[in-house]
Amino acid sequence: MSGRTRLTLCAFAATLTAAGALLPLVGTKGWLPQAALLLAFQSGAGALSRRVPLARSLTVAVQALVTLLLLTVVFARDHALFGVLPGPQAVQRIGELLTAGADDVGTYAIPAPMTDGIRLLLVGGVLLIGLAVDALAVTFRSAAPAGLPLLALYSVAAGLAEGGASWLWFLLAACGYLLLLLAEGRDRLSQWGRVFGGTARSADGLAGLTGPGGGATAPVRTGRRIGAVALGIALVVPATLPALDGGLLGGTGNGNGKGSGGGTISAVNPLVSLQNNLNQPENREVMTYRTNARNPQDLYLRILALDEFTGSEWRSSTRRLKDVPERLPEPTGLSPDVAVTEIRTNISASRSYQQTYLPLPYPATEVEVGGRWRYEPEGRTLVGDAGQTTGGARYEAGSLIIEPTAAQLAAAGPPPEALAREYTRLPGSLPDVVGETARKVTEGAANDYERAVKLQDWFSFSGGFTYDTTVSSGTGSTAIARFLRDKQGFCVHFSFSMAAMARTLGIPARVAVGFTPGTFQADGASSVGLRDAHAWPELYFEGVGWTRFEPTPTRGSAPAYTRPDTPSGDTEDPAQPSASDSAAPAAAPSASESCPAQMRRQGECGASAAPGAAGPADPGTPAGTVALGILGAVLVLVVPLLPLLWRIRARNRRLGSSGGRTAEDATARILAAWREIIDSAWDHGIAPDESLTPRKAAARIVRLGRLDPTAAAAVHRVAGSVEQALYAPRPRPVTALAEDATAVRAGLRAAAGRAVRLRATFAPRSAVRVVWAVADRRAALRDRWANRPGRGRWTGRLRRPTRQHG
């Protein structure tokens, strides 16, 4: 096999393994085989072009043209000229799918449904990365820079996947890249002729030029060793570094700050998590609290502050973590002249609400909480350490109700120079319309306080804005300008835009993320749900400190100091509520239904490009060999996935049928859903027992699978429907069979370990039904052949006489 053929196959394999990291982002996996097939055609087109040979730029152009034709055939065939050529209508159709896919990404929680737009984004993205990798590694003979597009593909999965991309996908992608580098190194060395060996010594004691048998051992072995060591470091070192991982408003995280006073914190844009929470069909409870504040509806629970605006997003700066002090320091900029009342709040988080930031009233003065927590002073935030999360946490917090008057805010002096410099920084990409609109809205204001109130009122009342959680995602400079033009969005758009406009006016500003006060209950507690997720701006006023504003209409409550002629005062009895008064959540949502997670990572990623000189021209290899090689690579990658693909097809067939209204059709749907539950339990290690009744089988699955109440109720409902279908004279109509089966599978996965989940996904035990079906079909064919008409006449002539009748 020639060097370019090896490089082509290695580039194909590296791209496909990196693309595997995208699998957790969507609910179905059928797009990956499709992407693999199209990628094989793309690679084959490159191999044929290089064999002609064509100029390098023309080779890339041919591959790009083939890619466009493939995407047209797959996604816009009905709009293409002759079903193949991408005419204007086909191009418009692809553009519509790309726009719809971008909207779907911002709307759906992970794993997202496989819409046509999302499928185009996935398949097209893999083909685009594959084209870049093939061009760099094979056409231009520089495999090292090809790691950059592979890293970009993996980074997309790491940034969007719930809990981050699995280490397994990183391992596969890294192995693909190392294979590509080794193939290129072997090809370069072979250009010099016979490769020198290693350490074998001749009789005179001098090192030989070849290894045993003359094989080229030293460079290849050295490369493999270096690659293995580097890969091991990449996997092991991050686990020991002080990092933070997990969801901003939900999901499991694992901060890893070590020691006392060490560690840092760095967070990312919360837009997707916020929008997913606000669009949940059910406002599932995540925590409850009791407080002695006079008006609990003004008590926001704050998670963290986003204080850095890069132009593409608002995010939290990297900060140092410290041990949690017994009493937190006084808030920055607070003057003794401002009225302050201290309150106590008892908070109880649901066990399924697992994230690494502790929701607290702002500004907190002391926190009594069990577990491993660290303190970030600038944002006055508590962060979980070494895997600590809020799941099931019960804690008590003291906090301040700061009650400035309008006169005190209006008379605020200039902020400290360092603080003003940091919190008024704006990117150069911010459109001029943002500052122009801010100045126009605040025209006539005498001070920063009046400007802030005018901005808040413009967003809330007079500006004509509409609250809409379905608006497409975006928090950068372009999104802010679009929001000011269209005047439709949700809390993220309102808060980010007001903070950016305040900075253009020289007012220090940042964005806080957390929860609105929730719903007051009859027993005196307040309940906070997923739909209470919120973002609001905080503006700094010297003498008062960081001050909350509420520009989002219909959400939360405007602070008293921003409302005209509104009396201040917020608390009554300063007595501390006891921890026993906290109410636990009434119904903890299951882990499988918890809100989607957001990654927390350091953001330190280095890559070096070391392009090498192109080697001498390669005579290439026959097209048939290339085609067979690509086909073999596809088979090697697809065959291990056959059990997974069969299981997905069986699940979709069993749960996707909705046709037929007769009693027989309803019974068939019920039994198919029950078979799906039995096979899901089997995949997770609970072998079926056909001697049990449906009711006892359901109880066994609940017990052995350690199902949560939601999944347990679902399996019992389906078992009851099976008994009705089999034994009742007139079975009751049933609905939501597919939802119940899906809930049971999710409960089994939530209770299983990593190894069990991986086997259930890639090597499901129930796939043995395929073997059984093949055996039954073979036995039936054998019986049919044995009993075919006329067989006795021919077999009688051919049968050898027995010894008795001889």
Image (tube, rainbow, N blue to C red):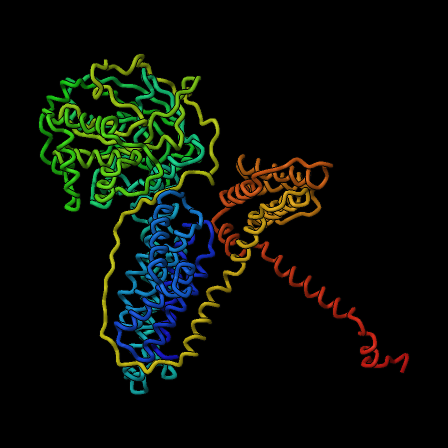
Residue 27 appears left or right of 602: right
Count of numbered circles on the image: 0
- Residue occupying the far bottom of the picture: 204
Q: Quadrant of residue 40?
A: bottom left
Residue 444 vs residue 174, the one in the foreground: 444
- Residue occupying the far right of the picture: 805
Residue 793 appears left or right of 345: right
Q: Is residue 331 visible?
A: yes
Q: Quadrant of the C terminus?
A: bottom right
Q: Quadrant of residue 670?
A: top right
Q: Quadrant of residue 372?
A: top left
When the figure is inspected, residue 792 is found, relative to residue 246, above or below; the finding is below
Q: Position of residue 603 (x, y in %)?
A: 26, 49
> Residue drawn at (40%, 43%), measured in percent from left and top?
108
Q: Position of residue 604 (x, y in %)?
A: 25, 51
Residue 326 vs residue 697, the one in the foreground: 697
Q: Quadrant of the N terminus?
A: bottom left
When the figure is inspected, residue 114 is found, relative to residue 782, above or below; the finding is above
> Residue drawn at (53%, 37%), measured in percent from left and top?
708
Residue 682 vs residue 446, the one in the foreground: 446
Q: Position of residue 522 (x, y in %)?
A: 44, 17
Q: Position of residue 679 (x, y in %)?
A: 59, 50
Q: Is residue 314 visible?
A: no
